[in-house]
């Protein structure tokens, strides 16, 4: 084969390989991280995260994907701000296609963890908890981050030392048990009456409870510490 023909064939082959490589790997991971970073940083500042990491995965690319001269990223509707998410990428020059790129955004922040192993049924108190930095994205429903989140609550499952505690791992600690004698604070428009009654169900602070008064009337109220039931008329 003449040298010019061989040279032309070599150049054509290189161009085909380069085009195939662009088609097979259309995502510039660094460009995607740069696009995401200010958005994640804003979320981190708003939510009080201490740090975050962005890991770009490999999208599923159709075998015949056309080479693209220019593309842009976009956030699909309803995309979560962290965790396992998808970022859209569409070609806007040279071809017409759209891909979803898998991205993992891990975030860390302070959360309440157990200072020592705690069995199920433990009524939580401040001395059993401490703040530590944890990876919040590992907690399916979010770890409790404020002491108020767990105030007056009891564990429904055992936890180990250093384990983040989620609100859904707890229940309200009953301050009133069914059958307890309780004191009613009946509050109306411009008046307040104290009375006695009996709780008909168990309830934690702030929870609804039904009460039978001494006269046999059934009232709905809100449980408070000290076996007090607030009833608003």
Image (cartoon, grey):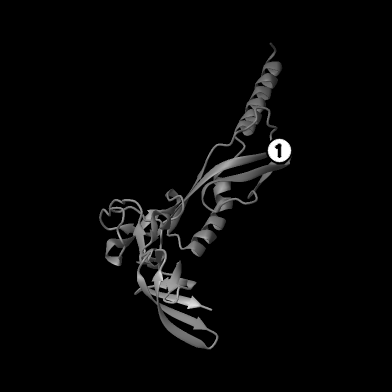
Q: Quadrant of residue 183?
A: bottom left
> Can residue 93 be seen in this snapshot?
yes
Residue furthest to the front in view is 215
- Position of residue 226 relative to residue 85, above or below, is below
Which quarter of the rendered picture does the N terminus lie within?
top right
Query: What residue is drawn where x is 36% and y is 65%?
Result: 177
Q: Quadrant of residue 26?
A: top right
Badge 1 marks a residue whose secondary structure is loop
Q: Is residue 139 left or right of residue 69?
A: left
- Position of residue 140 relative to residue 203, above or below, is above
Is disc 1 surrounded by few (<14), some (14 to 19) or many (20+) residues within 10 Å?
some
Which quarter of the rendered picture does the C terminus lie within?
bottom right
Query: What residue is drawn where x is 67% and y is 24%?
Result: 11
95, 39: nearer the viewer: 39
Q: Position of residue 14 (x, y in %)?
A: 64, 25
Residue furthest to the bottom in view is 190
Q: Position of residue 209 (x, y in %)?
A: 45, 67
* Residue designated by label 1: 97
């Amino acid at each position: 084969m003449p040298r010019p023909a061989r040279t032309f064939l070599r150049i054509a082959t290189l161009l085909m390989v380069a085009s195939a490589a662009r088609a097979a790997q259309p995502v510039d991971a660094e460009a995607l991280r740069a696009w995401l970073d200010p958005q994640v940083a804003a979320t981190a500042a708003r939510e009080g995260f201490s740090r975050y990491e962005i890991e770009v995965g490999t999208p599923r690319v159709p075998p015949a994907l056309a080479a693209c001269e220019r593309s842009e990223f976009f956030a699909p509707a309803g995309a979560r701000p962290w965790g396992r998410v998808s970022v859209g990428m569409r070609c806007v020059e040279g071809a017409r296609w759209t891909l979803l790129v898998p991205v993992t955004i891990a975030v860390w922040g302070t959360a309440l963890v157990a200072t020592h192993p705690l069995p199920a049924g433990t009524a939580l108190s401040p001395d059993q908890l401490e703040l530590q930095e944890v990876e919040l994205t590992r907690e399916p429903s979010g770890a409790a981050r404020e002491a108020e989140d767990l105030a007056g609550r009891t564990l429904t499952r055992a936890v180990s030392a250093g384990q983040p505690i989620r609100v859904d791992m707890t229940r309200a600690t009953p301050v009133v048990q069914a059958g307890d004698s309780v004191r009613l604070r009946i509050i109306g428009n411009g008046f307040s009456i104290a009375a006695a009654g009996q709780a008909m169900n168990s309830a934690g602070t702030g929870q609804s409870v039904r009460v039978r008064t001494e006269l046999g009337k059934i009232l709905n109220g809100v449980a408070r510490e000290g076996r007090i039931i607030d009833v608003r008329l």
